[in-house]
Image: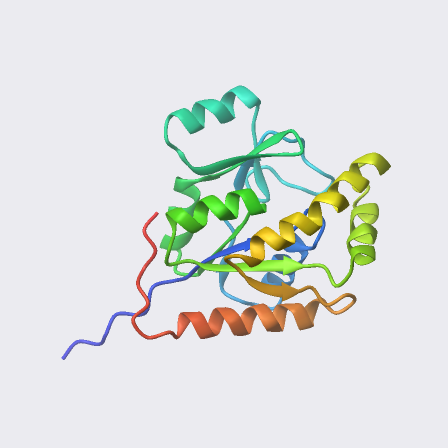
């Protein structure tokens, strides 16, 4: 009698306001040895300090982005703060083929679209512990001017409310990223073990 096939990897959609710590969370999960894969999303914004093309994002021109969308290569697209973002199908498929759980980081607009396209995915919304904590994160990043930070803070409350409509909320524990990792890992493990779970088609 042959052994049962291993359960399929999860697709985890991680959303939350700009600056809430989505990348820091996923980076720490990698450092702690969790078997997760992060497909690069496509964007028309410029790289921030330390970001690597093809790893953190696929940095492309506006024209290249639109061409990829028109060819059907992106699962979704959204305009955020004047820049385009999208999730390439090929990147997600390659990540799933690796056998690890796939974590897609998107803004709330992208998460709303993926919620319709990927009904079997696990949707998590990372939330700041306080508005002041989010302001400090944005200040520390150093990539936005003061007026831009104020605009992002104003939008954050709306984004949190929208995400709560279809995501499991997870508060980013200020000053203790490992506590946040533990909470996210527990949610992933619970969903991975859910009986009857099926593979997500991309």
Return the residue found at the far left.
1
Position of residue 184 measured from the top left corner of the image (x, y, whole percent): 57, 68
Seen in the image, is 28 located left or right of residue 39? Answer: right
Residue at 58% x, 51% y: name it.
Answer: 162
Return the residue found at the far bottom.
1
- Which part of the image, by quadrant, shows the N terminus? bottom left
Determine the image quadrant of residue 30.
bottom right
Residue 143, visible in the rendered structure:
no
Residue 120, visible in the rendered structure:
yes
Between 170 and 66, the one nearer to me in the picture: 170
Return the residue found at the far right.
146
The count of marks equals 0
Residue at 69% x, 55% y: name it.
Answer: 21
Between 187 and 37, the one nearer to me in the picture: 187
Position of residue 77 measured from the top left corner of the image (x, y, whole percent): 49, 35
Seen in the image, is 34 located left or right of residue 100? Answer: right
Residue at 44% x, 27% y: name it.
Answer: 68
The vertical placement of 31 against 89, above or below, is: below
Position of residue 109 measured from the top left corner of the image (x, y, whole percent): 54, 43
Between 70 and 148, the one nearer to me in the picture: 148
Seen in the image, is 131 located left or right of residue 52? Answer: right
Position of residue 120 measured from the top left corner of the image (x, y, whole percent): 37, 58
Residue at 32% x, 51% y: name it.
Answer: 201
The vertical placement of 104 against 144, above or below, is: below
Its colouring scheme is rainbow
């Amino acid at each position: 009698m042959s052994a049962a096939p291993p359960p399929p990897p999860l697709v985890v959609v991680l959303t939350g306001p700009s600056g809430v710590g989505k990348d820091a969370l996923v980076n720490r999960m990698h450092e702690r040895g969790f078997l997760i894969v992060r497909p690069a999303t496509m964007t028309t914004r410029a790289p921030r300090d330390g970001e690597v093309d093809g790893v953190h994002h696929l940095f492309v021109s506006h024209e290249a982005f639109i061409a990829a969308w028109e060819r059907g290569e992106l699962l979704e697209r959204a305009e955020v703060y004047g820049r385009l973002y999208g999730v390439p199908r090929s990147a997600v498929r390659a990540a799933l083929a690796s056998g690890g759980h796939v974590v897609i980081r998107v803004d709330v607009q992208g998460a709303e679209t993926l919620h319709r396209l990927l009904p079997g995915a696990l949707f998590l919304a990372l939330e700041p512990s306080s508005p002041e904590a989010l302001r400090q994160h944005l200040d520390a990043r150093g990539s936005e001017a003061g007026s831009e930070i104020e605009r992002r803070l104003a939008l954050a409350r709306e984004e949190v409310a929208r995400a709560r409509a279809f995501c499991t909320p997870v508060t980013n524990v200020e000053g203790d990223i490992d506590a946040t990792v533990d909470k996210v890992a527990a949610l992933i493990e619970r969903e991975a073990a859910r009986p009857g779970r099926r593979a997500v088609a991309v």
